[in-house]
Amino acid sequence: MTSKNLLKSMVHPVVRILFRALAQMLFRVQIRGMDNAMAVKNGQHSRLLVIANHESFLDGILVGLFLPIEKPVFIIHTEYVRRPLLRLCLNLLADYLSVDPDNPMAMKQVIQLLESGRQVVIFPEGRITSTGALMKVYEGPAFVAAKTNATLLPVRLDGLSRSFFSRMTRWPRKFFPQISLTILPPTTLPMPQSADARVRRHQSGEALRRLMQEMALAQPPQHTLYGALCNVARLYGRRRRVVEDVQQVEYTYHDLLKMSLALGRLAGRHTGHGEKVGLLLPNMTPVLALLLGLTAIGRVPAMLNYTAGTDGMQAACDAAQIRTLITSYAFVEKAKLADKLAALQGLEHIVYLEDLRKEMTFRDKLWLMGWALWFPRQMEVEASPEDPAVVLFTSGSEGKPKGVVLSHRAILANIAQIHAIIDISYDDRVLNVLPMFHSFGLTAGTLLPILTGASVFLYPSPLHYKVIPELAYDRACTVMFGTNTFLGNYACRAHPYDFYRLRYVVSGAEKLSATVREQWVDKFGIRILEGYGATETAPVIAVNTPMAYRKGTAGQFLPGIEYRLQPVPGIEHGSVLHVRGPNVMSGYLKVDNPGVLQAPNSSEGSGWYETGDIVEVDADGFVHIIGRLKRFAKVAGEMVSLEAVEKLALEASPDMLHAASSQPDASKGEALVLFTTDRQIDRAALQKAAQRLGLPELAVPKTIVRVDALPLLGTGKTDYVTLKRMAEEVHA
């Protein structure tokens, strides 16, 4: 043994104990899942590879201090070893190998270490995160794991990105933030079955990337929406400007807490604990504050769709047994809702925001300024993450709206799932034009930025096609969510420079057309990220990302989501999708059984949600949406997709809008009806389009109805209930 190694063996245990005690005192380190580490330590694992996310320069040191593994070898990026202080700490505490993670020869050295019996710690991202989210995962470490059949021990670090040892220069940083290490159950990465080594390497890298994303959800949400607001206000500081609306006033976290506490206290006088309170309000900061304030005092806000018409709103009120409705005089007048509001039956109280403000007494102000704002966490009633947070209502595009009860856990889990794959951070500004009564607008458009430190601009209507691009330009927005219909209209009316700052444009709620996708690329140079979801899943199920993108698909499933596919007789391509995960709803509230929660349950078992969508999942995990199960017509004994009919119409006339429905037919069972805004299209053009797409003659509709505009719901989706009625009227 050399004198250097002898000195290290003598100094190492003492220095380790001292450093561990110092780190525990400074960072108040919490360790979760120690049983997983001890099981690996005591088990027979000849080859052990520890993988961890990379948040700061201290990651390796802290993993070495607190992970109960004997003499691991740390694989360190060559750039970091050049730092004298870090190199000194590593020399005192552990063995290390400095490598370039993308260098194949370096990975051979790692393989040799594992095969010799050494335990290895590696950071698959290679570099420290500069976004707060997962960075690029290198294929080399994944191939090493698959090649050696090593046991993988995933370790999740949280908190170090907020320290001065990170590369998050624009975040509010602390010298010694609290840190947690979550040790996940051990696993393995099997070697992919492919004759091509490059394909095997790529597939291994993709499997490791998905595992790293799953690590971000290692700790499920342990708080409520209001509790999450208190946490993020403390993390980023109450002076952080976080939300703005059309009143052009920027509100801080302090302002949001203040409004939430005040409105919650005032609304609580008109409602009872556990009551479902209807909100008929647009996208405004006080509405967001009211929603959070109601959850803090144990009420459940039920977001009514004011574009659904009297029948739709009445069905929602009946299903959720809403007795108290909160709205605004100004909004009712501007949106011309007075007649619809007057027609609603069963309401006991209609409370107006303007009247609530007048009820604020001196005693309320004294309570707010002298007590509540100083101790905001103490103002929340005792609640569980599993308690109902909000009731949203399905669009009613295929029937009566159903109430969807989403728990705090479901919404916060979906936010964590999105944040694990898309790096929306402190520097981003989200433009949300989607209404909060829509799950996409509430979770992704509003709560995601608020609860992750980004800022958001709330706009009350997505239909102002000229104003919204100008807003994106004027407010330098970097993220925008929309539907295919809305994004297509913005592109037609926007200046080519209006979206110059946008990093992410995410499309959902309806299928993204090739025309809109190409229009955004050609005019703005922006690639739209198409996603897929449902109100019942809070809402996102799958989405394309910059790291995993495939044109024409809805992306890959979010981490934490299980899925199963069930074939359908008569449908050759695709199967019905069933999903289960932390973001799945608590259950339905239906008109035919008011107030009774029906927990999710499908043919796959309890807790599974049947989406009703026909999908295919390719070998790389990308989701291809074939169509809705309810949107198939049985023509002459054959199942014909109505979305395929719309696709061939779009092929024949790409610049117009088309929608398909069906009507009864005495000889064939059902017949296809095409509604279109194209005055020139005829059946011959549709037949040629079907031949180009390889679709059968049965998919070509014989009845073509020309309309000035397709009926739309407030969310931008096509109103298929109205179309079905129109098709039956045509038949009659």
Image (tube, grey):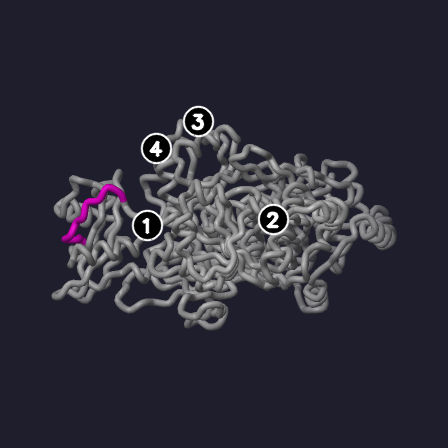
Q: Residue at x 14, y 48 (%)?
A: 683
Find the distance from the CA under tag 4 to the CA under tag 1.
19 Å
Where residue 11 sits in the image (x, y, percent)? 87, 50
Q: Quick one: label 3, few (<14), some, or many (20+) residues within 10 Å? A: few
The residue under label 3 is 497
Find the distance from the CA under tag 2 to the CA under tag 3.
38 Å
Q: Amino acid at mark 4?
A: Cys
Find the distance from the CA under tag 4 to the CA under tag 3.
13 Å
Q: Residue at x 77, y 41 (%)?
A: 175
Where residue 146 sits in the image (x, y, percent)? 55, 57
The residue under label 4 is 492
Magenta stretch, residue numbers: 700-709
The residue under label 1 is 718
| Main secondary structure along the magenta-highlighted residues | loop
Which numbered disc, 4 or 1, marks the residue closer to the eye? Answer: 1
In the rendered structure, find residue 124 and report the number of the disc placed on it. 2
Give the image quarter of residue 72: bottom right
Relative placement, left or right, of 438 versus 15 is left
Which numbered disc, 4 or 3, marks the residue closer to the eye? Answer: 4
Q: Amino acid at mark 1?
A: Thr
CB under 8 Å between callouts 2 and 4? no
Which numbered disc, 2 or 3, marks the residue closer to the eye? Answer: 3
Q: Amino acid at mark 2?
A: Pro
